[in-house]
Image (spheres, rainbow, N blue to C red):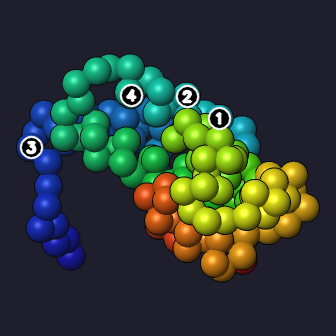
Amino acid sequence: MTTKAKFGLKRKDRDSYLELVLAFPLASIQSDDHLAEAQKMMDGVLARGDLDDGEEMYLDALSDLVAAYEDARHAIEPASDADMLRHLLEAKGVTQAQLSNETGLAKSSISEVLAGKKPFSRRMIRKLADYFGVDVSVLAANL
């Protein structure tokens, strides 16, 4: 028994989708070699420029498969508190002294975090999140 999906592709878009599936079938990524081939396929599709709906749908599905494999096999550790604070300082173009003056955080606490000797405290996270305009979850990843 066949059923008709509620969504679908017009003939031209369906043809481009099926052409891509035949060239590189959509299946769970099983190895780093398979991952490399999937990434090469995605690069090739993206290089086409303006994509039709079929190409977009294929690229979305293949991207999901790649992301699932990478999340399972090549997870990226959260940045250290020191790296995060260093990045935020550079991005805003402020010094440790300016940060201390404008937030009320002790210069020594800021220096200890940047040296990797001390993690963010909950109080520091709240003040830094407000000062840099980021969500507290960005700074609390290592708690």
Q: Which mark is residue 36?
A: 1
- Mark positioned earlier in the residue sequence (3 or 2): 3
Q: Position of residue 95 (x, y in %)?
A: 65, 41
Amino acid residing under circle 2: Lys
Dot 1 and dot 2 residues touching (CB under 8 Å): yes
- In the image, residue 140 sits, relative to residue 61, either above or below, namely below
- In the image, residue 122 sits, relative to residue 9, either above or below, namely below
Residue 79 vs residue 52, the one in the foreground = 79
Q: CA distance from mark 3 to mark 1?
A: 31 Å
- Mark positioned earlier in the residue sequence (4 or 3): 3
Residue shown at the point (47%, 65%) measured from the top left: 130
Amino acid residing under circle 4: Val
Residue lying farthest right? 117
Tag in front: 4 or 3: 4
For label 3, the residue is 10
Q: Which mark is residue 45?
A: 4
- In the image, residue 136 sits, relative to residue 84, either above or below, namely below
What crowding class fits label 1: few (fewer than 14 Cα within 10 Å), some (14-19), or many (20 or more)?
A: few
Dot 1 and dot 4 residues touching (CB under 8 Å): no
* Left or right of 58, for residue 12: left
Under circle 2, the secondary element is helix
Tag in front: 3 or 2: 2
Q: Position of residue 70 (x, y in %)?
A: 64, 53
What crowding class fits label 3: few (fewer than 14 Cα within 10 Å), some (14-19), or many (20 or more)?
A: few
Residue shown at the point (54%, 56%) measured from the top left: 102
Under circle 4, the secondary element is helix
Q: CA distance from mark 4 to mark 2?
A: 9 Å
Dot 3 and dot 2 residues touching (CB under 8 Å): no
Amino acid residing under circle 1: Ala
Residue shown at the point (37%, 35%) measured from the top left: 20
